[in-house]
Amino acid sequence: MACLFISYRRSCKDAVLATKAALEAAGVDVWLDLVAIDPLADFPARIRTGIAESHAALVWWSADYAESDICMQEFRLAWQHARRHSSDVAQRVWVLNPEPGGGHIFAGELNVSNFLTPPAPGGEASWAESLKNRLDALQPEGPLADERHSEAVPLIHGAPSSSREFTGRGAELMRIHSALFPPLVGAAAAGVAVQTHGLGGIGKTELAARYVNDFAIAYPAGVLWLNFAAWQPLQPASEADAQAAWLRALDAALQTAPALGRELTLDAEGKPRPAAEVRENLARHFGDAQSALVVLDNLPELSPLDVRRRILAFLAAPGPQGKTLVTTRDARPVDGYAALPLTLLAPDNALRLLARYRSEQATAEREAMAALVDAVSGHTQALVLLGERYREDAGGYPRALQHLREQGHLPRIEAIAASLRDELGDKARGIVAALSISFEPLTASAREVLGIASLCAPNSPIRDAMLFSAFQEYRSSGRDDVSFEDEFSAALRSLLRASLIERRGETDAVQVHPLVAQAAFMVPLTASGSAEVDEALLASEKAVLRVTLSETLLERFLPKSTAKATQLDLTRDAV
């Protein structure tokens, strides 16, 4: 017997149960979850299994459907299974619209012409029989998880792995996909672009990385991730400078595909091609028959606007089926781009994120967790740092809340928060206090390693070997008879454990978040109590580390383009 999974909000339970009864009377096996879901728990395994074992998913997309992250995860998981079977997702994912209008639905490729409506009074039997016939036709191909004839996984170049801390954002993921794949037919659905923007540290890059992780199969021609974190554009912006930054980002993205890199960027004599020619080669590589995605991550603010338009036209995905996703802090609209303002995490999702670090204590500490979420306004990076800091702490989140409030009233923290208010928003003080708390337990060695990493380009791979050589040089003052390898290893472990640095798919390299890098030199190694002395300590520390992280050292361990980008990052605000 064919099985149908129904995804719905509890607000529609009565109507869904009536539909379930009609379907079962027609001979359909219906998988419907009636068990209450703990709002602090992760996605239930029973639901994952239910979707996998069903032949199709019926999504009861009520006006409040997208407000539930669990519902959006159900939809996304069903979409992934269906898309691996066929590019025609509508064969297996059926959207039912119980509302008079359709403006509340954003379901990607699923066209409004495919949407179902609930059965009319008296027509339940014929409605259910029609769905049974559609469902029976799917039985020969097996359930959703039976991907015997699955489509090939596209090549992905340069994209970071999705963070294990990623929580929520189900609606945002589908809004991105719906903007890139509007429910239209033909060429009008091609060549579209999305611009996500928002405050620093709220997860723009993480959202894009999760989108690539979950939706890459929609781009058979491939996915290209270009990281512009190290690019500090000229003012006014220059098209030549932008094209040079694009070539560096492309070179870094293709480090794991050197043959493709040479094919795109070098001529027959091995000489570098002009940027425009490289872009033409990239367009030919993607082709014009299948969709390709280019992610422009950490795109800086570009002015004036007319130059910005020309630069973005060059940076965007080439070819008629190219689609572009931009992450940036710049909220100014871009012609031809669908804007997606990224807000702070919703309270339920923020609580779920904190609960991951202290799952056994989460229920008892929920009040303190809610206060922490409010104190940092659901800021993702701050919540991750607090979660790691108090994961094993006996005082747990109540102690974290007390500590956060104490830190927030320190003059030094207030001064830093004031300087970052435009970047972090109204709750800057709580966010800065969370950063400060995460720095407190670090040893001097860990602070020094973090300082070195923070001078490199953020959100870009930094080789362990380079960090160690810089740390060794910094500590030994040029002596080669003393090794600090053990101290370095311990420091690196503590930074990784605190999530102040992270590994993103590479075992020999780490990355530092831009906000952490920015804050690393705002709080000195030793708190003096004097803002003037603190500033002097910070300037001295930063200057010494800059000398240590020399150009020779960079070029020894980093690809040529990355070393150049990192060196540019080092010099942009030299002390």
Image (cartoon, rainbow, N blue to C red):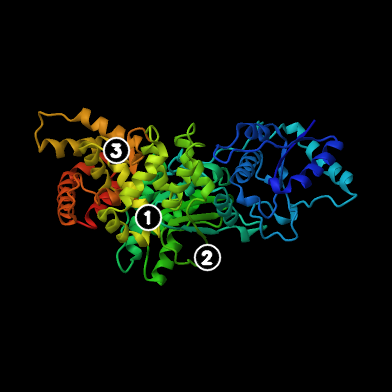
Can residue 300 be seen in the rendering of this structure? no
Can residue 553 be seen in the rendering of this structure? yes
Quick check: 564 above or below 39? below
3 vs 1, front mark: 3
Q: CA distance from mark 2 to mark 1?
A: 20 Å
Q: Secondary structure at mark 1?
A: helix
- Mark earlier in primary sequence (2, 1): 1
- Mark earlier in primary sequence (2, 3): 2
Q: Which residue is mark 3?
A: 463
- Number of labelled discs? 3
Residues at discs 2 and 3 in contact (Cβ within 8 Å): no
Q: Is 546 in front, or is 199?
A: 199
Q: Which residue is mark 1?
A: 246
Q: Secondary structure at mark 2?
A: loop
Q: Is 430 in front, or is 168?
A: 430
Q: Amino acid at mark 1?
A: Trp
Residue 39 coordinates in the image, percent (x, y) = 57, 41
Q: Amino acid at mark 3?
A: Arg
Q: Is 371 in front, or is 5?
A: 371
* 554 sits left or right of 15 in the view: left
Q: Which residue is mark 2?
A: 336
Q: Residues within 10 Å of mark 1 (few under 14, many from 20)?
A: many
Q: Which residue occupies 41% across, 40% down?
A: 397
